[in-house]
Amino acid sequence: MFKNSTLFSLLLIAAPLAFAQAAPAARQDGAALRKVAEQYLQAQSAGLPGKVTVKVGAVDPRLSLAACPAPEAFQQPGARPWGKTTVGVRCTAPVWNVFLQAQVSVLADYVTAAVPLAQGQAIDASQLTTMQGDIAAMPNGIITDMGQAVGRTPTVSLPAGAPLRLDSLKSKPVVQQNQAVRIVSKGENFSVTGEGKAIGNAGEGQVVQVRTPRGAIISGTARAGGLVEVTL
């Protein structure tokens, strides 16, 4: 009788242990992964002008991922965090990663040509207007501030209504061909100035070549006021 009671007690103890060992491991909640991706994209697009809307696609229901205490969102190098994009979510312990499709829209005002703009002619504020749309769906470099366009010249003629992009405009020259310029050569703990003549046109921050009075040709960075900086 004693032996039977002891055996029964051991079975009662072992049963819950066996049940615990057989219980399935916790699985990762797909909604939590979408939230991680959404927060990542919102942080990445925080500096964009306009109203940002983030939509993250559902996690593939066929996936069965082990629960992760700290999932982390990431993107591949070169990927844009706006427009139609892809976001990865990974876990280091246990190790896995999953990729989610997302759409980030940015509703904002952007600058367009109010009238046809001729190639090579400086743009005036009266020639510009603004429209509203999803700038995340447009090419990179869309101008959202008229100040970025005024005074610049189009590299090609643009029709009325055309959105303006930074790469389609040239900066107003601060140094012009054959202009007498002041050369400032800078090195560690010293600065030397001289005179020269610009060989070409250059906007603020662009590289320009200059001929010195002795006939030497040097390259420097064009600055406002007919200044060319040379770093030694």
Image: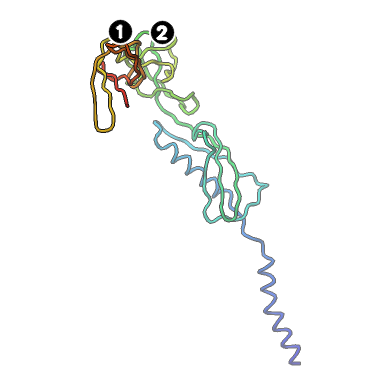
Residue 6 at x, y percent in the picture: 72, 87
Of residue 194 and residue 48, the one placed in the foreground of this image is 194
- Tag nearer the camera, 1 or 2: 1
159 to 142, vertically: above or below: above
Position of the C terminus by quadrant: top left
Q: Secondary structure at mark 2?
A: loop
Residue 131 at x, y percent in the picture: 41, 21
- Marking on residue 79: none
User: Which color scheme did the rendering employ for the protein?
Assistant: rainbow
| Residue 215 left/right relative to 1 | left
142 to 5, vertically: above or below: above
Instruction: Kindly identify the residue that appears in the image at 24 percent across and 29 percent down.
Output: 190
Q: Secondary structure at mark 1?
A: loop
Instruction: Kindly identify the residue that appears in the image at 34 percent across and 10 percent down.
Output: 199
Amino acid type at circle 1 is: Asn
Q: Which residue is mark 2?
A: 119
Of residue 192 and residue 164, the one placed in the foreground of this image is 192
| Residue 101 left/right relative to 45 | right
Q: Earlier in the sequence, mark 1 or mark 2?
A: 2
Residue 95 at x, y percent in the picture: 60, 52
Residue that lies at the very extreme toward the front in this rendered image? 214
Disc 1 vs disc 2: Cβ atoms closer than 8 Å?
no
Query: Callout 1: few (<14), some (14-19), or many (20+) C-alpha neighbours within 10 Å?
Result: some
Of residue 228 and residue 186, the one placed in the foreground of this image is 186
Instruction: Kindly identify the residue that appears in the image at 28 percent across and 9 percent down.
Output: 179
Query: Callout 2: few (<14), some (14-19), or many (20+) C-alpha neighbours within 10 Å?
Result: some
Inter-mark Cα distance, 1 to 2: 23 Å
- Marking on residue 178: 1
18 to 42, vertically: above or below: below
Amino acid type at circle 2 is: Gln
Residue 105 at x, y percent in the picture: 48, 32
Which quadrant of the figure has residue 220?
A: top left
